[in-house]
Image (tube, rainbow, N blue to C red):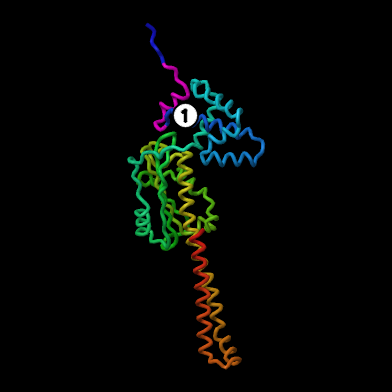
């Protein structure tokens, strides 16, 4: 009696290898690959951009339907890919699958194994140890790398106060400090590759900054057995960048407010400098006492700058 064997297809391979992929997800994958093929075949760039925006919003069914018979034809062709043995996939077909996954929505990975430090604890720690002028922290929502390994990134940023000049990057993995091999660590590269000038940091090597980055995962991809630096996984790199940019935006907002206050204080001093002289001149012209005029001018200046500050705060809150 011959032994019965089950033929492995792309569909069964994906379902077997990735816990969050089901038959339903494979059908959805087929639709996204189809939509991407149809969009790439579109000649007009403006139409292509609009279709991609709709794809991001999940309108995959409508996109395929809008192409009529050609859409159905491509859909049938893509379905055949899922029934191929994985070894017979062409490089182009494999790239299509990977690209389509980027547009699809998946359930968030399980987080019961992740133990982040937390925004509040990071801020307390940085404040207590570094005594900065400004501190903020962010914990990103869990993501996955290598198809299904959950990880989470949290970042704290401290500025000014008792900090020394230059960007000090404090690297952590699962709350454990990474003391060596900073140059080969994805934390260092992602933090350094930020365009800090966009966030009012003109010279990152001279500004008093401290950046704490903690990578939390059930399986941290270290570069070596020494476990002193995190490997450059694309998903982890991108998450660190996004987290750093988020805290950097908060710093930029703080610095903007600080610079604005200094500028307005300087302007106010300039106005107040001329109050005595203007008061004397107006007193001579109007016959009103110099002290009364001086008091009126000071009140006008105070109200004016209070109004400017309120408008600036309102503009920042709406931004």
User: Per the image, is 93 magenta?
Assistant: no
- Give the magenta range: 6-20
Query: Where residue 229 sits: x, y (%)?
Result: 42, 42
What percent of the width, then of the height, locates residue 160?
Answer: 44, 62
Q: Could you say whether the residue bearing mark 1 is in a helix, strand or loop?
A: helix
Depicted 175 relative to depicted 34: above or below:
below
Residue 284 falls in image quadrant = bottom right
- Quadrant containing the N terminus in the rendered view: top left
Residue nearest the observer in this picture, 171 or 12: 12
Residue extending furthest right?
43
Query: Where is residue 280 shown, x and y percent of the image?
Result: 57, 89
Q: Residue furthest top?
A: 1
Relative side of 115 to 306, left or right:
left
Query: In this view of the protein, which residue sits in the foreground, 280 or 108?
Result: 108
Q: Height in image: 77 above or below 163? A: above
Q: Say if the magenta span includes residue 10.
A: yes
As rendered, which of 15 and 263 lies closer to the eye? 15
Residue located at (43% from left, 43% from top): 181
Residue displayed at 52% across by 31% down? 31
Q: Is residue 170 visible?
A: no
For disc 1, the neighbor class at 10 Å (few under 14, some 14 to 19, many from 20) is some
Q: How many marks?
A: 1
Position in image of residue 140 (x %, y %): 42, 47
Q: Is residue 273 left or right of residue 16?
A: right
Residue at left offset 54%, top offset 38%: 55
- Regarding residue 156, the answer to whether it shows in the image is yes
Q: Is residue 82 above or below residue 196?
A: above
Give the residue number, with chain letter if any, for mark 1. Answer: 26
């Amino acid at each position: 009696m011959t032994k019965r064997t089950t033929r492995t297809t792309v569909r069964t391979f994906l379902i077997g290898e990735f816990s969050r992929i089901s038959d339903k997800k494979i059908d959805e994958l087929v639709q996204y690959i189809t939509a991407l093929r149809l969009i790439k075949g579109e000649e007009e760039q403006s139409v292509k951009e609009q279709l991609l925006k709709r794809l991001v919003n999940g309108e995959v069914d409508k996109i395929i339907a809008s192409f009529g018979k050609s859409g159905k034809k491509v859909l049938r062709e893509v379905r055949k890919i899922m029934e191929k043995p994985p070894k017979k996939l062409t490089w182009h077909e494999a790239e299509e699958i990977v690209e389509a996954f980027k547009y699809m929505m998946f359930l968030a990975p399980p987080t019961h194994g992740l133990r982040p430090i937390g925004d509040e604890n990071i801020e307390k720690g940085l404040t207590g140890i570094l005594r900065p002028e400004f501190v903020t922290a962010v914990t990103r929502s869990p993501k996955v790398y290598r198809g299904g390994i959950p990880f989470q990134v949290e970042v704290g940023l401290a500025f000014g106060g008792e900090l020394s000049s230059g960007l000090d990057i404090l690297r952590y993995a699962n709350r454990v400090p990474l003391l060596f091999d900073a140059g080969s660590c994805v934390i260092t590269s992602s933090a350094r590759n930020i365009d800090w000038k966009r966030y009012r940091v003109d010279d990152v090597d001279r500004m008093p900054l401290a950046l704490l980055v903690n990578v939390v995962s059930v399986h941290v991809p270290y570069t070596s057995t020494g476990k002193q630096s995190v490997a450059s996984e694309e998903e982890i790199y991108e998450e660190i960048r996004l987290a750093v940019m988020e805290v950097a935006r908060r710093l930029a907002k703080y610095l903007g407010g600080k610079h604005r206050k200094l500028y307005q204080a300087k302007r106010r001093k300039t106005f107040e400098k001329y109050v005595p002289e203007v008061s004397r001149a107006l007193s001579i012209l109007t016959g009103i006492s110099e002290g009364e005029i001086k008091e009126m001018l000071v009140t006008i200046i105070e109200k004016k700058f209070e109004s400017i500050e309120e408008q600036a705060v309102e503009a920042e809150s709406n931004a």
